[in-house]
Amino acid sequence: MEEHMPGIGFEQVIGQKLAVSHLQNALRTGRISQAYLISGEKGAGKMKLALAFAAALLCGQKEERDGNAEPCGKCHSCIQIQSGNHPDVVTVTNERAGISSKTGVLGVQLARFVQSDAQVKPYSGPYKIYIIPNAENLNQQAQNALLKTLEDPPAYAVFLLLARNTSVFLPTVLSRCVSLRLHPAPEKELVKALKAAGVSETAAVTAARLSHGNPGRCLELSGEELTAFRLELSGFLEKLRETDSYGILQFAEKIAGGKGENPSHMEDFLDLGRSWYRDILVQKSTQSPDSLIFQDKIKYIISAAAGLSFQGLERIQEAFDDAGRRRSSKESDTQIAELLLLKIRRILREAA
């Protein structure tokens, strides 16, 4: 099967059966709506789903696999989409519209660009598809301008709005779109995808659980850089109670990064560190390691759970909450990470 699997297509969309089923039904019946609003958090697979649908709409040699209509991945249209150069698939950004913006806001000029470009018929396919990433950044003026196009679009135009949430959209815009919400992917599907890519079972389960069902985050967590950081962090946290203050400062500086070639891992530190202590809390509550995230550190987690109180673990989670809030201030990441680790060390020592 691998040799036939294209780099685009619904097979690449992990854990979104409901959304895929809706689009597949549209392809089967030919009842293609002219506007879709695909929502979900960053990494959920919004762009992959949009490109799969666009490719299937334009592919002249669609193949049926596992009951789904899939783009062939080999025809001229599919190759153009894979390379990002299909003339009938327009990814709408300020840059594409020739608009200079430092804020990321999508304004009325962008909506007018879409309105004007949509009057140009497709070059080769039956559809002209407009994909608008970060559509939640459309301001009200832009939404009102875009609404004119959505209310009376050319028959060949299909609009795919991709957004993290739908609360910012005008009711009139929402009423013109078919709304497809992407949900967290099941763990077993994420693990299956990672194992197919050569990731070990234990590493795949760890990445899947850490990602909380987010395919993009899951892929990041299974990569070499974040896997190495996760192992380094868990090793450091295992020895935190005995680590001196200078050792904590050195590690905090490494987490903050920004010096030379060292990347910042502050977000990863807060995410993984919180999950580490949540594992200890889960083990203390359930006395079962089956649902733990850090499957390669079960022995330590069981030991730590026996030695820490519920109150102590709650204080640790509160320390992470405080660190997250302080990131919005002007305090440096090094200071925030150092203080957080010192707080945790104090709680660990009090429990000893």
Image (tube, grey):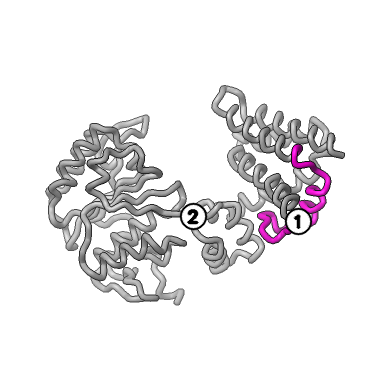
- Magenta span: chief secondary structure: helix
Query: Around disc 2, counting alpha carbons within 10 Å, would you say few (fewer than 14), some (14 to 19), or many (20 or more)?
Result: some
Identify the residue shown where x is 27% and y is 42%.
96
Residue 263 lies, in percent from the top left, at 59, 40
Range of residues picked out in magenta = 288-312
Q: Which mark is residue 184?
A: 2
Q: Which mark is residue 57?
A: none
Residue 88 lies, in percent from the top left, at 22, 56
166 vs 302, left or right, is: left
Residue 197 lies, in percent from the top left, at 54, 66
* Badge count: 2
Q: Nearer the viewer, mark 1 or mark 2?
A: 1
Q: For residue 76, which quarter of the picture?
A: bottom left
Q: Look at the image and say whether residue 48 sits in the magenta stretch.
A: no
Identify the residue shown where x is 45% and y is 52%.
44
Mark 1 secondary-structure assignment: loop
Type of amino acid under label 2? Pro
What residue sits right under mark 1 in the picture?
287
